[in-house]
Image (tube, grey):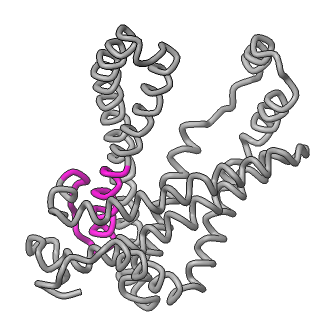
Amino acid sequence: MTDGAPLPTVGELARHGLYRSLASLEVFALLGGLYVACNVLLAAPLMDYQNAFLNVIRTETDSTELMRRLGELEAPRYNFIIFILTLFLSSVIAVLWLRTISFGREAVLAGGISALFRRSGLALLRYITLILLVVGGSLVAGLIVVLVGGIVGGLFAAFGLMSQGGVSVLLTVLIIVAIVTVMTILYVGFSISIIAATRDRSVGVLKALELAGPGRWRLFRCFVVIAALSIPAYMLVLLIVGSIGSGSAALWFVISGNTVVYLFTAYGGSVAVGFYDWLEPSLPPELQAS
């Protein structure tokens, strides 16, 4: 995509991402296997707790007894360390994948291992920033929905236009929609900032969202479509795995869940690279390719 090119449509972005993914299918599969295998190793210390947790969920039908039994489970250790290691793993995989589809295999490790760790460190910082922004943005969005929706829903209930139960359901749906919307908007900025990081450029998540201009809404809609496909796929896979009821259910949860996450996020990265290539000529000089 060149300077002055028309804004790509959602369909063009989706096809571009698919073409780039298929063009590097071998790397796509190898990185996916590495991602899943490493996550299984990282989750190993938590497997006993997760299996016990799933067993209680599967066998206990009384809600009071369920909460009591869950409270008796010994909490897993090293959660925070495992969380940080998982984020760093995601950062390394993201750098390897995004550089592959941006420049080809020969440029993946350009600059050596030190450059890989530097880029991965920048990507990790973007992940942490995204998490903090999502938490803060979701709290604000949820509060606004509760305040405004509560007032409107209360009026509807007062005039007999809606039951209290209906108001509660509506507020729940609106809160979920608001949170998902905030997450997706922020993910647009995150995707641009992390691609910049893989190209040795530094731009924050919110600044990247600003630099995306009106085109951000095309990428936003593309991510909405990807999320609309990935979330049901993720839930279906977990439902199938959960019904197996074997003693190694937690292992299969980790394998299947991380496989679905990788497939859709890697594809989303390919889509975002296409958008970044279109956007790059309009970026400040310090964010353009040398």
> Measured from the top left, where is residue 143 in percent x and y?
32, 23
Residue at 75% in and 16% down: 63
Q: Quadrant of residue 155?
A: top left
Question: Which sits in the foreground, 56 or 164?
Answer: 164
Magenta stretch bounds: 184-206
**Magenta highlight on residue 175:** no
> Measured from the top left, where is residue 264 in percent x and y?
53, 65
Q: Is residue 232 left or right of residue 144?
A: right
Q: Is residue 115 left or right of residue 76?
A: left
Q: Quadrant of residue 53?
A: top right
Q: Residue furthest right?
A: 246
How many numbered badges does the structure rendering display?
A: 0
**Magenta highlight on residue 205:** yes
> Measured from the top left, where is residue 234 in percent x and y?
63, 54
Residue at 50% in and 89% down: 23
> Measured from the top left, where is residue 81 in percent x and y?
55, 41
Residue at 72% in and 49% down: 238
Helix, strand or loop: magenta stretch: helix
51 shown above or below 267: above
Q: Is residue 85 left or right of residue 290?
A: right
Quadrant into which the N terminus falls: bottom left
Q: Residue furthest front?
A: 160
Quadrant into which the C terminus falls: bottom left
Residue at 41% in and 57% down: 224
Q: Residue furthest top?
A: 158
Q: Quadrant of residue 152?
A: top left
Question: Which sits in the foreground, 169 or 254?
Answer: 169
